[in-house]
Amino acid sequence: MAHHKVKKGELIKAGRVQVLLDTFYARNEPTIIRTLDATTRLFLRLRARPVLRLLSRMLGVVFSTGEVVTTERALRFIDAISVLDTTEIAVGPCMCQKALNRRKGSYLKDMVVLYGAEAYKHAYPAEYEHVTPERARALLREFHDEGLIPTFFACLRSEGWIYAICNCESEICFPFRAHQAAGAVMYAGPDTVELNLDGCIGCGTCVDRCHFAANTMVENRSRVDLSRCYGCGLCVATCQGQARTMMARQGYRRRYYPLDLVGDAAI
């Protein structure tokens, strides 16, 4: 059975070694999360945030880091890989909730893709289930409605090592909390929000939906700090005044989301 990865805008065979390496990582991921979570909490208690930032950048070279995208872009990625003869999409438990023994919202929300689907299925045969592209699309829409952040995760900071679309939140998700504490874990995606103040009715839903604290209310009108906007688009769908749209991010530096494979038609 072939397992695929992305390289230069194409889906190519990943190779057995890559699957085995990711399977090894998957089996140890709960332990890794617990260890890094405890380490992060320790450095924060010691007020050693500069050391934590350095450690975050060093570990990010090897361990997984993520790029935030809109749900529409995640859906387009599912479309792009649905041309494969076999389903290379599986869904299983949120590894952060599993590792830290905490629960909030959806539990089965870790969507592993391409060679990652096979790796996690090997590591947790009873917990991960292969799903069709249609089911994957439906789940992504459900996660969007729940207010989760679609994030493409990859190891070795390489597009060719994309293995999951995690659907993150800000309370339990370790990558999110680690990024807030030290940076260099989650990166802004190719889009950012655009606000039309004339359409804002002051409903405040944008503030509630934003995990990155990019939105605030000033004199009953919404304001957005674009330096804090990671481009998830969660605030756009629930804006009651339809005052928000997504636009291409200026100076965007592509990380993992495979624009060459998916195309840049959808924001």
Image: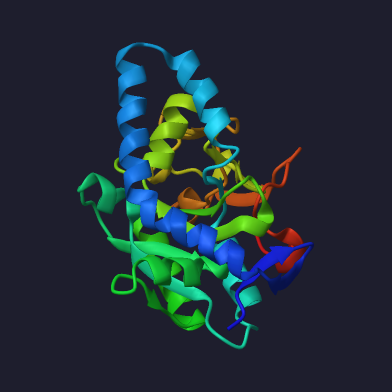
Residue at the location (62% across, 51% down)?
246
**Image quadrant where residue 6 sits:** bottom right
Residue 54: image x %, image y %? 54, 21
The quadrant of the picture occupied by the N terminus is bottom right
Please say if 99 is above or below 171.
below
Along the horizontal axis of the image, is 93 left or right of 132?
A: left
**Can residue 202 be seen here?**
no
Residue at the location (52% across, 46% down)?
64
The quadrant of the picture occupied by the C terminus is bottom right
Please say if 228 is above or below 10.
above
**Can residue 230 be seen here?**
yes
Please tell me which residue lies in front, 110 or 232: 110
Numbered disc total? 0
Residue 208: image x %, image y %? 35, 42
**Image quadrant where residue 32 sits:** top left
Residue at the location (53% across, 68% down)?
113
Along the horizontal axis of the image, is 171 left or right of 4?
A: left
**Image quadrant where residue 142 sits:** bottom left
Q: What sort of colour scheme is used for the picture?
A: rainbow
Pick out the residue farthest to the bottom.
Answer: 85
Residue 137: image x %, image y %? 48, 74
Residue at the location (30% across, 70% down)?
127
Please tell me which residue lies in front, 199 or 108: 108
Residue 90: image x %, image y %? 43, 73
Pick out the residue farthest to the top.
Answer: 47
